[in-house]
Amino acid sequence: MAAVTPTPQPGKIEVGKALWEGRLAYLYILPAFLIMAFITFYPIVYQVWMAFTNFELRHLRLQNPEFVGFENFVRVLGGLPIPNYSFGRILVFNTVWTFVNVFLHVTLGILVAVALNIKNLPGKRLYRSLFIIPWALPSLVSGMVWNNMWHERFGAVNLLLQELGLPGNIRWLQETQPVINIPQIGLVLPLSFFAVLIANVWLGWPFMMSIATGALQSIPEELYEAALVDGASGWQKLWRITLPMIRPAMVPATMIGIMMTFNQFNVIYFVTGGGPLGLTQILVTQGFNLVNQQGWYGVASAFNLIVFLILAVITLITNRISRATEPYYA
Amino acid sequence: MNQRLLALISALVMLGLVLAACGPAAETPEPAGQGEGEPTEAAMAEPVTITVWHGYIETEAETFAAAVDDFMAANEDVTVELLAVPFDQLQSKFQTDAAAGGGSTLITGPQDRMAGYNEAGLLAQIPDDASFLSELVPAAVEGGRIGGVLVGVPLNNKVVAMFYNKSLVETPPADFDELLAAAEELGLAITSDWFHNYMWVSAFGAQLFDDDYRCVLDETGAAEGFAYFKTVCDSPGVTCDPNDGDMDILFRQGLAAFRFQGPWIAGDAISDLGEDNVGATVIPPIPGADYPRTWNQSEMIQISANASEAEQAAALRLIEHLTSAEVQQTFLEAANWIPANQNVDTSVNQVVGGFLDQVPYSDPFPVVTELNATWDPMANAVTQVLEEVLTPEEALVEACELINTANNK
């Protein structure tokens, strides 16, 4: 009886062959991977481990932390013994903060880009250069400047209002009475929200303007000529031609804006500090305070893992939206 | 052939990385740690660089830097690098860095911060037989002990009192009603945080902690004190704001004739208003209550547990210099520090004399870790009361609940 030789499975042959054929490529990326492993992957794994322990300041040197299971996650979601803490309220505020900002960024950016796209507009290049400045400045610097500008006594905003004969003693960053209060959804917006909103819109709209400007250049002029022949109004051209044509560029930019604004630490931290009474705290600033002020490394790790999961969900949704975006021609 | 050459180079690079990672670790000097006594003479003779992190600004920073420069001129084997860190960030920065094996050699700060540092094992023991200790105020030296172990040396004593502008106020008010009447026209600036407003608690007979360091503000009548504080802030001419620097500015620019503050702004106030126009005195008593009792604390300088034997030796020499009568006299004259050295004549300084008058009407900082949990909740309570978000009773109940939960009481 002849011996039966087992036939290698086709899938394994292909993977092995692919690995062998790509050995040089893997060799090239291995150093970068090793570095990434030390500076990125290992800290992430360590943070995940910390989230399941009672890691605090004393555990950095003196003791090993104890495993506490999901206790940190329960505490983060249920309530921590720090003033003004409510995960739900902070999440609602963070979400409103994000989408209000991005809406204003995109709207303002597109409007200015369209205005600057007018043919033969004098000083077009100068305006485009000047309007980039807010985006070019470090957000830390901008945040501190805006904090000073909103100062009740010595801030430029109140001083200007006084010069104009208007009430100039507005407590922009200290007033605790909310301007908008919807307790049913946990939404509380004090005056400081609008102050930091203005600061962040000032920072963020140039990015959208830049994206829109580039996208506008790719719109064929013939479309507008054809629309003109058909008697389209300016509004119709904007709504039927300009916006659909720049959509493939603006949607990914909007997604990036959502990610950046959701985690906009510098503006919140340096303009309002999360106050008054924690009413302008967002998730990343709260997570920072858990470490910086409390020294609760384990709790902060759990907190940030939850934030990561939230962002992952948002990323998946936005990726799906981005893929659904089709070019106007298709 | 080119691909093979590139592959060979890549392999050599990786091999180099692996060998570097697997090689013997560089030898680092072992920290002397606690309880190892005076450093050896050999350690003291080596050139050494030490770092000092502090939270001083303006006059205090300049005076401190000058004192350090004098030390280096007299001790050429020691280089001292100073780093000014924002006061509110100094504690967390040191805790985090030192816990990870880094941080500065020395750190200054209020004595209440020592409890947290010590709990995390960040402080080296100061030898009990250090010669300069005998020149310092014994009670202040004892304030540097935790669990009987000396981990901090006092640089000065600080207590909040009442500054007044002598060009606007001839005689300080005798009680709080007189103060508020004067403030209506002349102005009173108060920092609305917990540190500056502990005094209302004590004026109405309340206390912060019980014997087990459990917050009892909500049980011992502190609400009455906070209610009075609210009426003070609502009085005409009184400005209450959480921004400490802004309130200092009001006094320094002559916009407020009275200011509740510690001696650290005395130098700057004198620079702005003139030496003859800056006075300090006891915060007047509240009619129907008692004298407001402010916090009393020593500013300590501590040595990091990460310091090597040579660094510790150099650090002790610097501490000896900073606490010497000569240098303490300089701090008294320039920065109006209440000296920790008992051989310094304070009678010539009227401002410091005013703060010394306040000392009997002050309570020492409890140097316990439980105090750390009070700062945020109580600052929040102050805001809630002043902004009328909660009544004083409600704010204190909420604050004590947070404090006791955080302290596992």
Image (cartoon, rainbow, N blue to C red):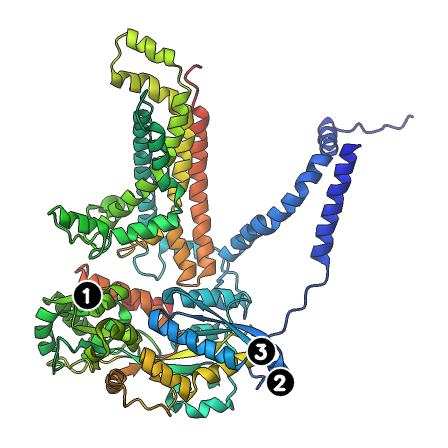
Helix, strand or loop status at disc 1: strand
Task: Point out which mark residue B263 bears.
Answer: none
Q: How many marks?
A: 3
Tell me the residue at 41%/84% (across/down): B327
Residue denoted by label 3: B77
Same chain for marks 3 and 2? Answer: yes
Residue denoted by label 1: B240
Residue denoted by label 2: B40
Helix, strand or loop status at disc 2: loop
Q: Are marks 3 and 1 in contact (CB under 8 Å)?
A: no
Which numbered disc flags the more N-terminal residue, 3 or 1? 3
Closest to the camera, between mark 2 and mark 1, is 2
Badge 1 local density, few (<14 within 10 Å), some, or many (20+)? many
Which numbered disc flags the more N-terminal residue, 3 or 2? 2
Q: Tell me residue B300's x, y (percent).
A: 41, 79
**Gap in angstroms between the C-alphas marked 3 and 2:** 15 Å
Q: Tell me residue B378's x, y (percent).
A: 28, 67
Which numbered disc flags the more N-terminal residue, 2 or 1? 2
The type of residue carrying mark 3 is: Asp
The type of residue carrying mark 2 is: Thr
Closest to the camera, between mark 3 and mark 2, is 3
Helix, strand or loop status at disc 3: loop
